[in-house]
Image (cartoon, coloured by chain):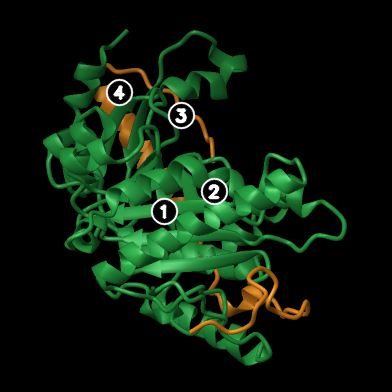
Amino acid sequence: MKKLGEIKEQTKSLAKALQISSYLIRISRIPSYSTLISKKGQGEIFVGIEIANDLLIPACLKSILASETMYTDKNSLAIGLGLDISGNVIKLNLLKAKYTLITGISGSGKNSFLRMISSTLLFRTTPNAVRLLIFDPNRQLSGFKNIPYLLSPINDNPDYFVSALVWVIDEIQRRRKLLKEVNVKSISAYNQLPGYQNLPSIVVIIDNLAKLSKTDRSPYGFVFKIIEDGVNVGIHLIISDENITPDILRKLPKNPFLITFQLATKQDSNLILGQSIAEKLLGRGDMLIKESKNAFPKRIQATFISPAEIELLVDFIINNNKEFNEDFKDIDS
Amino acid sequence: MTRGDNPDNPFPSSWVYPPLSLLRDEEKTDGRKVKKTVSTIEKVLKSRDIKARFEEIG
């Protein structure tokens, strides 16, 4: 039996024969694959040879949303992350994730991915079920500025950001009190009670946390508290940053649902994933997810929606739901 | 900025969902290109005395 290293040595020969850059070839052991075809080869060790397309063929949002995996999922907070190397749709369940942490260098697909998450919520939910709070100093999500899901205008001001986090903590307390009054432990149980008004889930999207932290009041303590206490009362955090430093990681709770696009260096990959792997990703939506601390990172081509499609989507929602006006909360106090 | 006293259900219940037809269709992978790639990999590995078995998994 050949060793993995001997097979890896053939990368240049394969690239030459296929007339592509060796950068597009990845040879690695695939532990989960044995399970996949266990009937044929139980116990065998498999080596995967992945040849990336030289032309980008994105996992389009349309086919992801129409897939059986997404179509049959009644959880409105399920997000179709993309396709794994076997072509399976891989989901993120915001209800189960403690919080979601996304990172990747510029051009890796991180910002498109945030737009895809927002778009998915627009396709699958209503403002009665899900409300959004978006903080966007890089103006990557400004296409969503007029949607009626927003609890507050999309904002890029660090001071406003801290005020909003305080508002979210107050909202957590309010919801906990409501749940306690009727003796239920989760928002889903509360929302099933007859005669009570539905509490919408709140998805907080924070892009560029480091930039939003440049204020006198550090937001990390508030962010930490929201992550720890928010999920049970329907408040879910998605944090995205290009530069996740050891300092940022120390200030955030452990065990996020990790989504890593291409990173600049081996050191960055080691910091985020505990292994040198994400620096070898190809960019343009090529990403790894790690669902828990001990999980093996899974490679996925991210779901994509173009800016033109987002414009159509937002226009449709606004033009066809005119009675749903913005309902901004007074959170800047 | 506050509009309305009800913090939870400020909207009427009717909602028009956006149709998927707003989105573009997936580009299909060229099956012939995949077969050609597999055949090339097979030849290269065989010439290096590496036995390979290909499985279509997706």
Q: Residue at x 47, y 78 (%)?
A: A310
- Callout 3 amino acid: Phe
Disc 1 versus disc 3: distance between alpha carbons?
39 Å
Vertical relation: A312 (above or below) B37: below
Q: Position of residue B4 (x, y in %)?
A: 63, 82
Q: Quadrant of residue A156?
A: bottom left
Query: Which type of secondary structure does the marked residue at label 1 adopt?
Result: strand
Looking at the rendered structure, the secondary structure element under dot 4 is: helix
Q: Which residue in the protein does label 4 denote? A: B46
Which chain is represented by orange in the image?
B
Q: Residues within 10 Å of mark 2 (few under 14, many from 20)?
A: many
Same chain for labels 2 and 4? Say yes or no. no
Label 2: element kind: loop
Decide if residue A190 is on the left or right side of residue B30: right
Mark 2 or 4: in front is 2
In this figure, which residue is indicated by the disc labeled 1? A238
Q: What is the quadrant of the C terminus of chain A in the image?
A: bottom left
From mark 2 to mark 4, how far is it between C-alphas? Answer: 46 Å
**Measured from the top left, where is residue A16 in percent x and y?**
17, 42
Q: Colour of chain A?
A: green
Contact, mark 1 vs mark 3 (Cβ under 8 Å): no
